Image (cartoon, rainbow, N blue to C red):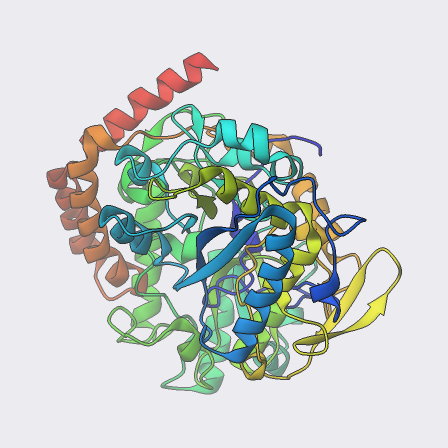
Amino acid sequence: MKKKVVAILLSVVCSIGLLSGCGREGSDSGTILSQEVSGVNATDNGTSAETESNDEIVEIIWQYPTTMDTNSEGFRNVENALNEMMERDIGVHVTFEPVGLSESQNAAILAVSAGERLDIMLSAFTSIGNVVDDGLIIPLDDLLDKYGQDILEHSYTKELCGFDGATYGVCTGNTLGNDEYGYMIKKRYWEKYDLANITNWTEEKLYTMEEMEQIFEIVKAGEGDNFYCDVPPSTEAKPLNGGYIEYDYLSGSLSGGVLMLNRDFSDSTIYNLFETPEYEEYCKIRYEWAQKGYIAPDAAVTTESVEVIVAQDNYLGMFFVSMPQDMIVFDKGIGEEVVCLDMVPRYQAYKGGSVIQWSIPITCKNPEKAMQALNYIYKYPEATWLIQFGIEGSEYEVVEDDGEHKVIRYLAENTSDLPYYMVYGLWGNVLQWPSVEPQALDNYEKQQALDDAVPQERYSPAFGYSFVQEPVATELAAVNAVINQYTPSLNAGSLNPEQALPEFINALKAAGMDTIIAEQQKQYNAWLASK
């Protein structure tokens, strides 16, 4: 596999809220498994060279991010079919431990700290620095070299899952740089107000904030009061869900400072984003939009999910960062089609190494078998397809097959009605998956092409850098608390930035953000000098 520096892995998450569901064409990510799965052998003669000489089956407890009922018959059928394969081929029996995707690392920390048995854990949308610093997971380099050759061949694990000189995780999937940044608008309003012609839309057009305000003004005037144009998530600190400007945050969150890539991709200076003129301008825009009624008055405090809110008739759409091939996820979520308006050209940020990755905690009784289990889903697509999409004839059918690629169709209009449904695309090598109708046969090749199309000059220079947080752990906790206090209201435009922004910056300084950035700059400079 061609090795290159690549961006972060949000693009393989098929559905996480609505932030991973926009593009011009696409569907839920998916896989295919034969109806004869229980009879599929990973080796020609029905045995595996990987199976150890003794007949002992090793139990592996594996975190399983899901929203489905894992007590259901459909889940048990898939788990049993997987174990029939893995017991035969590598002497492993997997027990999946259900967990929410965003809560996976915290749940693992609690379990491991309490000494509970856990063999494979997941970290999603956060750095693994804290679990490394606390000694809760083990380095994987030797295990990868001995038992993870298929992982190394089919993923960017070595490039993205390192921390302080060692590899601590296995990446989920391997297409990474195809995020779009922009605004998703319901198609019926796009057509009703002839916005394509008004805004001179083309496939290549990049919309500015001024042009987005023009659209909001037109639609708001036509739809009247109690109609809103954006849904700022109350739990997201990043401006416009991360799609306002190009930057790279170096600690897995904004608390550790950022590289301002929008100014210069080669600039090694670390900034407090909230203290920049760019962020001040953003806050002013959001406040003005709230005053004009484009944002709901309760946006900063609502407890409803963005999925529920944006699906309502009195909402136009929302800002997004997502994969271009997965608009169908968003369409299904809100029950109607959308059009995506790009705002920031594609670029590659490292984001503090906060990829979605599997790790082996210190409570694992047999790390060798845990690594073999991880490697198995990269080596044998049958296993990946099974976990990701279930069983052919039960969850899906094949509708197109050219001998090299396949397209499948779910056997229920509403995927929640399926006996088994995996909403998150975290398993194995994405490029080996089939497409999901209405995606094209070569959908995943197109994803790889998007990765390849991002020029090297639009890569963050921080790829491979990891921030050792222990020296400023106290300050990080305090700064994150301040960020969580102010950003929901600033994002929603419910605070006047002339007064609130200076208060916010002073609170950040009092919590120790300058100390964090100084430590970050010191470590980053040393890392740059060592390259």
**Could you say which is closer to the camera, residue 441 or residue 351?**
441
* Residue positioned most to the front: 54
Q: At which x and y percent is residue 371?
A: 52, 41
> Position of 361 compared to 515: left or right?
right
Q: At which x and y percent is residue 273?
A: 32, 41
**Could you say which is closer to the camera, residue 179 or residue 442?**
442
Q: At which x and y percent is residue 36?
A: 75, 68
State whether residue 29 appears in this view: no
* Residue positioned most to the top: 529
Q: Quadrant of residue 363?
A: top left
Q: How many marks?
A: 0
**Could you say which is closer to the camera, residue 350 or residue 34?**
34
Q: Quadrant of the N terminus?
A: top right
Q: Quadrant of residue 515?
A: top left
State whether residue 413 appears in this view: yes
* Residue positioned most to the left: 510
Q: Is residue 34 above or below residue 266?
A: below
At horizontal 43% and vertical 35% (from top left) the residue drawn is: 168
At horizontal 72% and vertical 45% (from top left) the residue drawn is: 449
Q: Is residue 11 above or below residue 421?
A: above
Q: Quadrant of residue 187?
A: bottom right
Q: Is residue 495 above or below residue 43?
A: below
Q: At which x and y percent is residue 415?
A: 58, 79
**Could you say which is closer to the camera, residue 151 or residue 323?**
151
> Position of 29 compared to 290: left or right?
right
